[in-house]
Amino acid sequence: MSVVIVAPGQGSQTPGFLEPWLAEPRFADHLGALSEAAGVDLAAHGTVSDADTIRDTAVAQPLIVAASLMALAAVLDEGSGSAWKSKTAGIAGHSVGEVAAAAGAGILSEHDAMGLVSARGKAMAAAAAQVATGMSAVIGGDQDELLAKLDTLGLQPANFNGGGQIVVAGELPALAALQADPPAGARVIPLQVAGAFHTRYMQPAVEALRSVADGLEVYDPSWTIWTNRDGSIVTSGSAFVDLLVGQVASPVRWDLDMAAFAAAGVTGLIELAPAGALVGLAKRGLKGLPTVAVKTPDDIAAAHELLDAAQDADIDAADTGVDA
């Protein structure tokens, strides 16, 4: 039995979600260092900023990555000499969550990860400002029929989330047309994001981000890490950063990540703050998988229980000769 730790993407943030974390000095200090690296007042945005403010891509992305890094440090109980990390299968991130995953896997320092995500958010916001675009979630229906309809409307699939959900992106009139006439059996739900992320509209952001990434100090991962590109495990730090840059304008294949987790024998999933979305996808795409959403520090104990259960199952399997 093994547990994968996952970091969420944009849209998972909500007003005030960092308040429970900042009540503890250790998290407040950690966030202060992450804020300084990003050049953004994350404490204010995570506590008092309203929904419109934290929807801004340049704010949302560093805010989400910082929250995931704080939660990851808490789950791994870093500095205490504990072995929580050894009880995991590895780490993965959804979209911008891959930046947090890269830091967690040791590919980037936290300081460089925050600098990168700050640049990423600004570059994607600038690219989104060039054309009025957006994103919509399509739930249900036939995938081939949907993809054919997207071609007709000039839209693109942005996130293959698994469990019958695909996020599509493109110009707003085309998204409105899809909502008015969806494929049979499908629901189209507009998302509160200001841009067609993971599509051709983000190509200017790719070029801007590549110049930033070229100046980073990159290491090979010290922890198993899966990529959004195709669900594969990446063993080269430089290769992962290259994928991270290109990912801005290419589809997120979270469906393939979940399939890879299943193939690897993963039997538990912990989602880092601001948690909830990936646990929801796992409940549909990996039915029956035990999950923990680390939304506040109160959820850390449940994450540790899941990790302990995984280790106990491995020990029992070893004692009995049964493959867990």
Image (tube, rainbow, N blue to C red):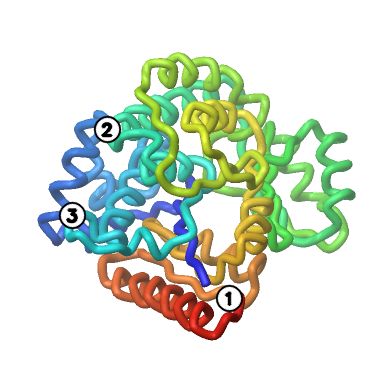
Distance from disc 2 to disc 3, alpha carbons, whole Å, reads 18 Å
| Disc 2 residue crowd, few under 14, some 14–19, many 20+, Cα 10 Å | some
Residue occupied by mark 1: 324
Q: Secondary structure at mark 3?
A: loop
Kindly check if marks 2 and 3 are in contact, taking CB atoms under 8 A apart as contact. Answer: no
Q: Residue 295: which quarter of the image? A: bottom left
Sequence-wise first label, 3 or 1? 3
For label 1, count other residues whose C-alpha is less than 10 Å away and answer few (under 14), some (14-19) or many (20+). some
Q: Residue at x 59, y 34 (%)?
A: 197
Q: Where residue 286 sits in the image (x, y, percent)?
A: 64, 68
Give the residue drawn at x 74%, y 59%.
187
Which residue is labeled 3 in the image?
A: 79
Query: Residue at position x 84%, y 35% from top?
Result: 151
Q: Position of residue 277 (x, y in %)?
A: 51, 60
Q: Residue at x 38, y 55 (%)?
A: 14
Q: What residue would you read off at disc 2?
A: 111
Q: Hey, what amino acid is under mark 1?
A: Ala
Rendering quarter of residue 116: top left
The alpha-carbon separation of the residues under discs 1 and 2 comes to 38 Å
Q: Earlier in the sequence, mark 2 or mark 3?
A: 3
Vertical position of residue 236 compared to residue 179: above or below: above
Mark yes or no: residue 42 visible.
Answer: yes
Marked residue nearer the N-terminal end (1 or 2): 2
Q: Is residue 310 left or right of residue 189?
A: left
